[in-house]
Amino acid sequence: MKKIGMLIGFLLLFSVPVFAKMSERCLDNITLQKTMNYTFATDTGAKNLTITKNIDCLYGCDNVTNVCSPDPATLNMWFAGGLFALLIIIGAIVRQWRGY
């Protein structure tokens, strides 16, 4: 019986998954759960394998988008960079319009 279990494990290890599906959801305000479902085709039918991983989000878990919230400093840098790029573009358009 042990040899059959080892043989099935070996076949699952080296077979190519036919179907893989990943889902993410927030369990609470700080924990994100990632679940990966694999379906393997074998001679006797399909075998399913489910892997579940819980991730602690440092800045909270967003229940609407089901992702970990980003670092506030990173968001501020993206906002400042976008504002700076917008000012450069507006300045270039004004300079072109005035003929400088």
Image (spheres, grey):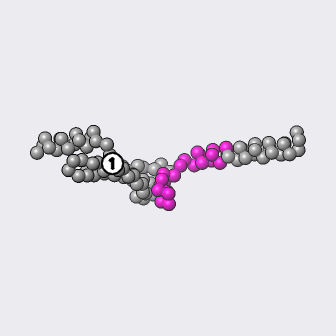
* Quadrant position of the N terminus in the picture: top left
Confirm whether the magenta stretch covers residue 63.
yes
What stretch of residues is rendered in magenta? 60-81
63 shown above or below 40: below
Q: Quadrant of residue 7?
A: top left
Instruction: Look at mark 1 in the image and give the residue it sits on.
Output: 18
Residue extending furthest toward the bottom: 64
Q: Amino acid at mark 1?
A: Val
**Which residue is found at the position 71% from the left and 43% from the top?**
85
Disc 1 is placed on an element classified as strand
Residue at the far left: name it.
1
Percent across and percent down for residue 27 are: 40, 58
Is residue 77 magenta-colored? Answer: yes
Say whether residue 95 is visible: yes
Task: Write the residue at 46% across / 50% down.
Answer: 57
Who's the residue at 67% across and 43% down the image? Answer: 81
The residue depicted at 31 percent of the width and 43 percent of the height is: 16
- Kindly give the residue lying farthest to the right in the view shown: 99
Rendered image quadrant of residue 31 = bottom left
The x and y percentages for residue 20 are 36, 50
Measured from the top left, where is residue 4 in percent x and y? Answer: 14, 43
From the viewer's perspective, is 88 left or right of 7?
A: right
Residue 31 visible somewhere in the drawing: no
Rate crowding at label 1 as few (under 14), some (14 to 19) or many (20 or more) other CA atoms within 10 Å.
Answer: few
Quick check: 93 above or below 63?
above
Q: Nearer the viewer, residue 46 or 88?
A: 46
Residue 73 picture location, percent across and down: 59, 46
70 or 87, which lies in front? Answer: 87
Total numbered labels: 1
Q: As drawn, is 24 to the left or to the right of 90?
A: left
In this view, the residue in front, 38 or 62, is 38
56 sits to left or right of 14: right
